[in-house]
Image (cartoon, helix red, strand yellow):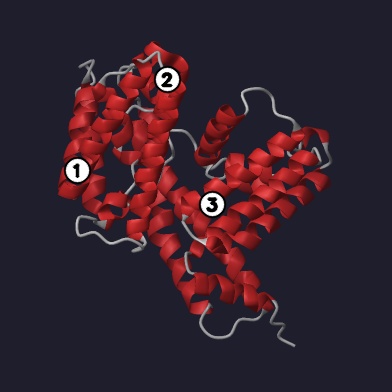
Amino acid sequence: MWYLNMNAIMAISGMIVILALTRWWPNNKRILLLAFNLSFLLVFSKKLFVFYLVYTLLNYIGFRFLCQTASWRKSWFITLIALNIAGVSGMRLYGMRIFENPLFDTVLLLGLIYNVLKVIDAYYFAYFIGKDARAPAIDYANYILFIPTFTSGPILKFRDFIADTKQPYKLIAPQVEDNVKRIILGLFKTIVIVPWMSDIFISMQQGELHTHQSLFLMVWFYARIFFDFSGYSDIAVGFGRLMGYNIPENFKKPFQSPTLTQFWRNWHATLGDWFRDHIFIFFSRKTPSKWTAASLSILIMLLMGLWHGFNWLYFFYGLYHGIVIALENLLGKSTVNKKKVSRTYFLARCALTQLIVTFSVIIYSGSTETVFKIYRGLLNWPF
């Protein structure tokens, strides 16, 4: 996470100043940004720098090949994606110490689960658009290595990034003010609020837990996750837009979501959008039936769960959310139009959705012991 390091923040801020001073140069957003991205990675870690040079080059070769080839396109498309999935899965298994190799370094995992999604999105673009999807190597490299969103998203779409690249760099006072305020808000969340909430969470889970304590910890941890992740997203969006790119929103008032389907369009929105777009496109080119949509919902949520971590907790987390979304599809309750229902009904649906999410979000703690301890505490009445 760059944003907990003041040197990294100063480097990114300095790059924005350089872009502003060279805005008269049509290619400043392309050439200077590539130099910055590569230099940043080199200073941060030589291993990470070398890894991403090779990773980006290999995938760019695959991208250009897929743009131009006319034979066996679907087979090549699937193969290139499968190789990337196998590669990132293998790296994660090394990170979990299931496999051992002296060449492996945990720093190589930095940003990889986000960047592989960007690589796959570029392959989709190449496959469906063909020769017109071709992009210069410099723009492809900037897309993969874009520092503001490198470690935690939001997840950029290839076509949108390339479109922004073609626009001249512009910076106006209101834009600077809005994004600087957003960066400060994000830093406040991640540096002040999150550590304080983490300390309380750790302190309260010591010793035996009862029902009310477990409930409090679930709600508290849910709020902590929101401040943590939305804080990083605020910083990334602010810095990215100051660099001349329209970074998409990752959090769109998720607490006002009346269904779980709508929740995943508002919470980590770019991740939910990525899985829906790519899975539905691949498995269902036409409007799916309710049963097909329900089945794909379970598959998407299972994949999203495993994307967060290779263990049974995340598997069941994805299955749990997938089943609820599937039921919403089958029952025709996947969306609620706020303007067509009463305020009481809308708020009740929002509360139900948050209850469903709160029950499972503790899995993000990453500790099996903590998760089971809090769940056991729910059944431990204090009287």
* Residue 181 visible in this rendered orientation of the protein: no
Q: Quadrant of residue 148?
A: top left
Q: Which residue is mark 1?
A: 49
Q: Amino acid at mark 2?
A: Trp
* Residue 345 visible in this rendered orientation of the protein: yes
**Residue at the image position 37 percent from the left and 59 percent from the top:** 191
Query: Considering depth in this image, is 171 or 195 the residue closer to the camera?
Result: 195
What's the CA distance linking mark 3 and mark 2?
A: 32 Å
Q: Residue 377's spot in the image, x, y percent?
A: 64, 78
Query: Considering depth in this image, is 357 or 371 the residue closer to the camera?
Result: 371
**Residue at the image position 82 percent from the left and 46 percent from the top:** 345
What's the CA distance linking mark 3 and mark 1?
A: 29 Å
Q: Is disc 3 in contact with disc 2, using a CB cutoff of under 8 Å?
A: no
Q: Earlier in the sequence, mark 1 or mark 2?
A: 1
Q: Quadrant of residue 13?
A: top left
Tag of residue 72: 2
Element type where label 3 sits in the image: helix
In the figure, is residue 133 to the left or right of 292? left
Tag of residue 305: 3
Tag of residue 96: none
Q: Residue 241's spot in the image, x, y percent?
A: 37, 32
Q: Is disc 3 in contact with disc 1, using a CB cutoff of under 8 Å?
A: no
Q: Amino acid at mark 1?
A: Phe
What's the CA distance linking mark 1 and mark 2?
A: 33 Å
In the figure, is residue 60 to the left or right of 342? left
Q: Quadrant of residue 121?
A: top left
Q: Earlier in the sequence, mark 3 or mark 1?
A: 1
Element type where label 2 sits in the image: loop
> Marks 3 and 2: which is nearer the front?
2
**Residue at the image position 37 percent from the left and 12 percent from the top:** 131
Q: Earlier in the sequence, mark 3 or mark 2?
A: 2
Q: Residue 180's spot in the image, x, y percent?
A: 36, 40
